[in-house]
Amino acid sequence: MAVSLDDTIAHRQHSPLSFVLSRQTFWVFVAVLLACIALSFATRSFASPTNLFNITRNFTFTAIIALGMTIVIITGGIDLSVGSVLCLCSMVLAETMHAGAPIYVGIIAALVTALIVGGFNGALIAYLGMPPFVVTLGMLSIARSLATVISNNTVVFQFGPDHDKLLALGGGAVHLFGLTVSLPLIYTVVLALITGFVLRWTKFGRHVFAIGGNEHGAMMTGVPVRRIKVAVYIISAMSAGICGIVETGWLGAVTTNIGSGMELQVIAAAVIGGANLAGGSGTAFGALIGAALIEIIRNSLSLLGINPFWQGTFIGGAILIAVLFDRIRNFRLSE
Amino acid sequence: MAVLELASISKHFGAIQAINDVSLTIEPGEVVGLMGDNGAGKSTLVKIIAGNYPPSHGTMRLGGEAVTFHKPIDARQRGVEIVYQDLALCGNLTAAANVYLSRELHKGFGPFKILDYSGMYRRAGELFKELKSETRPRDLVDKMSGGQRQAVAIARTMLSEAKIVLMDEPTAAISVRQVAEVLHLIRTLRDRGIAVILISHRMPDVFSVASRVIVLRRGVKVADRPIAQSSPEEVTGLITGAIDRIQ
């Protein structure tokens, strides 16, 4: 049968359905749904409004940073400093407000701190060619140390005249369609929509993927690789800063331990959600799903009465299964 | 009028003379094979034309006008496109995304601009059709054959009105069937009036597609011959130095 060149060029290899079915993110999403259904039957408390409210609030702290981390991972980089940057930004916010400044000054101070830290990370990585792992490992140590210095290792729990506004910002809730929805969940959904839009519909997003696919090639083709790399580390630090502000409002206190070890949980969420540490792939939706799966594992273990010491094993298992699944699918395709 | 004219171009890096007094002219729609052993100065010459670095001496003219390039983008704006040996493609992006990389099309107005996916798919499809290549704009480059990848890299050069395309060893690492595909792409460019400089080690490719062959040895041009008057044996002799030079 003769097939014309026009037909071949116009032919789509994948239907939208087969494309969705081939995504790791989709299967993790299915796993999350199945887990939710099973837990609703297995325990009396899982599907209760209070528990659902808690889960959808608790996962946001990982999810917000996982959005920024996913963008960094798509370029083939990594940001180990997010947990410490969260701590530093929280502490800057807390100390500024404790000194009597209004809430907006505290928030601006925290975000400017994130901007400076992210810009510093990005400049060392993009312009001096230092490995992201090393630069952000250094910043992991520096940022937490600075937080300890400015607070003199004390706990801050009084936030000056705008104390109540800050607590409402992080701990508040609104009623939507008869459901009680936490404010952090709303922030997370808005940030995820923005992230998803930027990755899919802007030149910047396209270039982020290009750098992860072939950095040298992207540079030779005229992509402003260095500027984009600085921007992604700023975005990552800003996501940690935003999360720090929200989490401070929810907790009502800041210690120098806040966000400690969080970088690994955030990276786990991004990877479970389909971000490839070798660069070139990842989605905003995947970051949310990965963070949700981790929170559901944590929540269900305690509801099912399993010793919480097992949490790490289950979360680690989820990482391995998600990535293994992707590998097996790729083996099949390459055969 | 000649599309490209080099007059007494020399390039030295410190004490090393990479290119020594090379002059040549390229006409529109001409395919010229540039041959020489490793270290003969082929890539230095190509990098001078593509604007990677300026020559130490000599002048370069494009369409009769003297030009000085400081950056590759300068050369690109004057219609000099280069297809790198490794093609500089991103495997995780579609063919259309690669064709348009860093020259993306947008739609919308004012500050509300989004990527014009359908426009880029359509135009990339038209370019592949012009190249008579069975390449689908929506396919990921990772899933493509070597010949299709070449088509993507060449389609990139056709986005702007290129006058001259430099191709660095396009057939070095692909299968026999794909080599035929690439040679076909080069002829398509030629038929559109675009001049092609083909840097290659492979004698059969140069002899099947080029109308002229230029041989460099130790930075010096030792031959500039119409293909019809030459032979693979003669070119081999010129490359190795068994034949000193033919003027």
Image (cartoon, coloured by chain):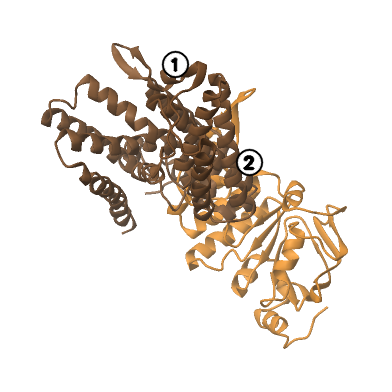
Chain colours: A brown, B orange
Name the subunit of mark 2.
B
Which residue occupies 36% across, 36% down? A16
Task: Report the residue marked by disc 2.
Answer: B103
Picture coordinates of residue A100, whole percent (x, y): 56, 20
CB atoms at circles 2 and 1 under 8 Å apart?
no
Q: Could you tell me which quadrant the C terminus of chain A lies in?
A: bottom left
Looking at the image, residue A259 sits to the left or right of residue A104; the answer is: left
> Whole-percent x and y of residue B173?
52, 67
Question: Would residue A6 be seen by someone viewing this image from the given angle?
Answer: no
Tell me: residue B68, above or below residue A95: below
Q: Secondary structure at mark 1?
A: helix
Side of A293 where A278 appears, left or right: right
Of A37 and B174, nearer the camera is A37
Residue neighbourhood size for the residue with mark 1, other residues' Cα within 10 Å, grouped as few (<14), some (14–19), many (≥20): some
Q: Are dots 2 and 1 on a single chain? A: no
Disc number for residue A164:
1
Foreground residue, B33 or B207? B33
Instruction: Decide if residue A188 is in sight here.
Output: yes
**Identity, as a three-letter code, of the amino acid under mark 2:** Arg
**Mark 2 element type:** loop
In the displayed structure image, the side of residue A299 where residue A203 appears, left or right: right
A249 above or below B212? above
* Residue B225 place in picture, x, y as percent: 76, 73
How many other residues sit within 10 Å of disc 2, few (<14), some (14-19) or many (≥20)?
A: some
Q: B132 or A91, which lies in front? A: A91
Q: Is residue A271 above or below residue B38?
A: above
Nearer-the-camera pick, B217 or A63: A63
The residue under the point 28% across, 40% down is A27
Query: Circle 1 marks a residue in which chain?
Result: A
Which residue is at the far bottom?
B242
Of the residues shown, which amino acid type is indicated by label 1? Asp
Q: Percent from the top left, x then y, of residue A111?
A: 56, 31
